[in-house]
Amino acid sequence: MTEPSCYNPGVPVEPRFDGDYTHNTGQIKSFTILDFFIFSLSLLIPIIIGFYQGWRRRHTMDFDEYMLARRSMSYLPVGLSLLSTFLSAISALGIPAEVYKHDTLWIWTTPAYFILSLATAHIYMPVFYHLKINSVYEYLELRFNRTVRTVGSSLFIIQTICYMPIVLYAPSLAFSEVSGLNLWGSIVTVGLVCTFYVTVGGVRAVVWTDSFQMCLMFASALVMVFGAMTTIGIKTMWDSAHRTERLLFLDFRLNPTIRHTVWNLVFGYGTTLLALYVGNQAQVHRYLTCRTLRDAKNCFIPRAVWISCPGYILFGILSIIIGLYMSALYENCDPLQTKLVDNSNQLIPLFMQDILSSVPGLPGVYLAGIFSGTLSTMSSGLNTISMVVIEDFIRIHLKSRIHKDKERLISQIICAIFGFVCLEITFLVPRYGSVLQASASVLGIFAGPLLGLFSLGIFFPWVNEKGALGGLFGAMAITFGITTLPTNPQEKSPLACISNCNVQAFENISNIALQRVQPRTTAKPERYEGFQLYRISYMWYSLTACFNCIIIGCIVSHYTGSRDPKDVDPRLIVPVLDDIFPFYYLPEHTKKYYRFGIDHEGKFEKKILSTLFGSKEDVILKSPKDGFSKVANSHSVSFETEL
């Protein structure tokens, strides 16, 4: 006799999948020797790349080569490195799980990435690139003072040390409990491999291994999509998504306490992404290694090759499709209800074994793709931490300059030390619920205020160092309270059914009458009587922190003596009305008013629209240390045309 459907009582259960799937056997499959071999090979290749880069340049490996590749990298590997650093294992595990537990609204993060790419490439990046600085936090000293620089650098180090253990622990835990992969063995192995090739090969090893790992991540996602398409079918997946009401694309509600809406995914999450590409040395470091500003821009909005922005959009769409296929396979036998998995982070490893285990080696390919995201994020973090320590702590406190060879050796030692520190902290990481939400909380506390700090410097020339520090610490205090005090009300999730489970295979399912399980969250949240700001969605954390930093910073500067904008180096300020379409069409007297008396003469002959996809010439600008000239062009005061 056929059981009724969870969603339409009286209608036979659909879809029904026969075979050795976990909902039929109650047993979780393990990796084969071939899978472990492929995974081991994916760890060996970065070691080879790191050793090769270190050996090839062993006679010329000074600090500039080790950390910046002498600013000679092309945009193709740098763009892939930018993308792989951001698309960590958190994205690969979290996005499909988000679709499975909720809906497809995550698709709205793709236009957010496009907006941030424009903002980064044409507002913030030219300032940093033209100054020829090694550490992005050097800008804070040029704009404010050394104290602000030290604080910004310290916050970056703390943020990275808090974030990298999450990136390492989450996939290791997910695969260990579902596929038999040893938890601490995988953590230690991946951590040591990453520390080795970053320490030996420097930034070239990081960029080229990131490029390899990004290709591997895309390959693993495509393998999963085509495997699911063959097993489940497009029509079955689409019909299931309709039945379970996961196909949600339009939610324009303005309530900031709702977990996901179009608004907080585009503007809230977009601000989080922007914060990573502006105030995070791990991302800024990548485009500072490019040989020209044109190449740096092409990492985001390329003319000939689709890299960072289209790459994120493609990976996001593939991850959403994987989540829809996963919901179709487990539509009538929810692994969370049957306790096959403990949390949503383990859904992808379970789905991987159900879909790919019939072809030997494919689970190993997908495993390698997931951990490639971990390696790329960790390698970028370790490489940039060592640079920040050298540039922002050692160099500025020593009266005499260290020899470049010794600086390179010191940076290698620092990289190795922080690699072991992150491994130690990983052992203290608890079992997170949603890795997406956990990472957003960490980034909201640190990245959001840092974005506000850089925005204060770039857009508000009257803000002084007291306002900068006041805004930064005030925003951090507010954001910390939001993220650590009361939790957000839970959202109603799709129905979780077990009507198509093999009851005999699950000891915890005692009654076949449990065919219709209510939504995973049915209890109406209690009325919250506290400060309503604590109820906002985690997607607003970074945007709220950025605004708080700007508002507090402007107020503190006003009451402590605002800085005269005429005393600010024009290279450190972006006149938005002159640089951004369509504002540069405003009357000249309007634009002049909002330059706040800063002399940008000769700076606006070329409009941003003409350089959106590249220009015929780039401008190289001298460091502020070389002196201040009155000839200004494109965020600088001294320039030469680059062919």
Image (cartoon, grey):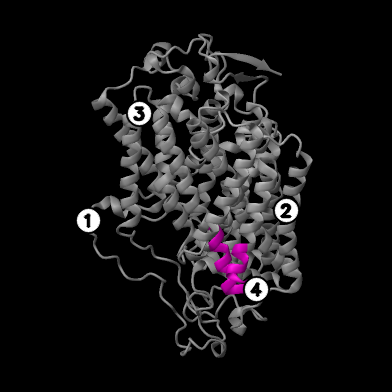
Q: Name the residue rendered at 51%, 58% in the picture.
A: 166
Question: Which residues are drawn in magenta?
Answer: 167-188
Measure the alpha-carbon separation of dots 4 and 3. Answer: 57 Å
Label 4: which residue? 354
- Report x, y in % for residue 525: 29, 65
Label 4 to label 2: alpha-carbon separation: 31 Å
User: Are discs 4 and 3 less than 8 Å apart at CB?
Assistant: no
Residue at the spot of label 2: 47
Residue linked to disc 1: 530
Q: Main secondary structure of the magenta part?
A: helix
Q: Residue at x 75, y 54 (%)?
A: 45
For residue 465, which numbered disc appears in the image?
A: 3
Mark 1 secondary-structure assignment:
loop
User: How would you rate the neighbour count of disc 3 (Cα within 10 Å): few for under 14, some for 14-19, many for 20 or more?
Assistant: many
In front: label 4 or label 3: 3
Q: Is residue 214 above or below residue 151?
A: below
Q: In this rendering, is residue 165 above or below 108?
A: below
| Residue type (three-letter) at the residue carrying disc 1 | Gly
